Image (cartoon, rainbow, N blue to C red):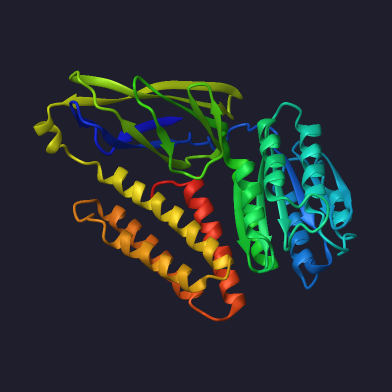
Amino acid sequence: MKITPRLNFDLVAVEAEDTVHLMLELDAPVAEADRERPNANLEVVLDRSGSMGGGRLVSALQATHSLLGRLRPTDNFGLVVFDDDVGIPVAAGPVGDAVAQRQVLHQIGTGGTTDLGAGLMRGIQECHRVAADGQATLVLLSDGHANRGVVDHDQLAQFARGAYAHGTSSSTIGIGHGYDEDLLAAIARGGSGNTHFALTGDDAGAALASEVDGLLAQTVQAASLTVKPAGSVDAVRLYNDLPTATIEGGFMAELGNLNSAEQRRIVLEIDVPAMAGLGLATVCELELRWVDVDSMTSKVKKFPIQVNVVPGDEAAARPEDLEVTTELAFQRAQREKREATDKLRRGEHTEAVRDFRASARKLRDIDVAEAPAALREEIAREANVLEDLAAQSDTHDELDRMIAAKQARMDEHMKSRKRGRG
């Protein structure tokens, strides 16, 4: 994996406190067209509660039927369904010719209420049973709220976080306009997966297909970034909304899996103390760990981040890396988008509209005249997204506001967690 660290400023003034921002660019390896990939482990956890009628369940089952044709006979597939009870129509195991699994799909119908936690936990158990010490992907589809069993968001996210620690990533697909987007986003965040908003059953099928595409194209699994302040540096902060854990001397962020040729951007903020000596100074130590899928071997790369301490007049004329500055502004906009979405969900839609528009104006006010055209276009697109969200939220129609909140939550989740170039 190619790793490129870039600072917005690599010069700091002697005997002066400063704050610099680091953008870490990650480029996953490109999968060879004829590579022999490891067996995939896929578990679908499907809400079959009564509200999944009206074609939603049928569309999800049709999508599951189609994805079976994408898997090899030696790949593992399983299906868990839940309403107020949990069932396992397809026990996780090798796909084989997929005839038996497809026959089972035709027998699944809608049921009662929504014990989402039980379905999630049973799906995780199935992943661990067949994947052993290997990697697995769980995709949960639901159109509602957890209203039986475990319903606490943090606890359900912790289930997903624990599963990820043992090799299972969890993605979620919310169907329609009635599901709890905060809950599904929390599960996806804890499980280092993706979250999707599917307005219709067909949209849900497309989202499920995209998850299978990603699973089959993975070249990096279980990536994590360890960050430790160095020297007299007190604080290094992560801008991306990634799961983190405190470790001795710093923290560790979970990056999840990367697909073939996928690009990621991670932004860190570093408080640089006043330093008396001139020359290079290490401000933090980074360590990236991942599993290379082609070789199924663990990889580690350690590298220091250094600034150059120079006289004040030289620092005053320091050049700025516009791509790093722009990425910082982009990630700040994601935070503001999340805060505005929270207001929208609380019914404070006037305040949410104001905040979406204010965030768009901030992006448009960034001076990127000297930046490459692609960078200018990227900022303009994100400002347009924020303005569109403001327009969608500026209504007295509760359904339209609910849809806007779900679109905003999904957009923020993906851009903050799995942000690439362009």
Question: Residue 222: where, in percent of width, then height?
Answer: 59, 32
Question: Residue 1: where, in percent of width, then height?
Answer: 46, 30
Rendering quarter of residue 309: top left
Q: Is residue 157 left or right of residue 132?
A: left
Question: Residue 225: where, in percent of width, then height?
Answer: 49, 30
Q: Residue at x 61, y 61 (%)?
A: 197
Rendering quarter of residue 336: bottom left
Name the one closer to the observer, 15 or 107.
15
Q: Residue at x 53, y 52 (%)?
A: 413
Name the one closer to the observer, 256 or 114.
114
Looking at the rendered structure, the number of numbered marks drawn on it comes to 0
Instruction: Name the outermost residue toward the left.
Output: 313
Rendering quarter of residue 407: bottom right
Above or below, 151 against 250 in this view is below
Question: Residue 18: where, in percent of width, then height?
Answer: 26, 35
Q: Is residue 37 left or right of residue 361?
A: right
Q: Is residue 307 left or right of residue 225?
A: left
Visible residue check, residue 192 = no
Name the one closer to the observer, 83 or 221.
83
Visible residue check, residue 307 = yes
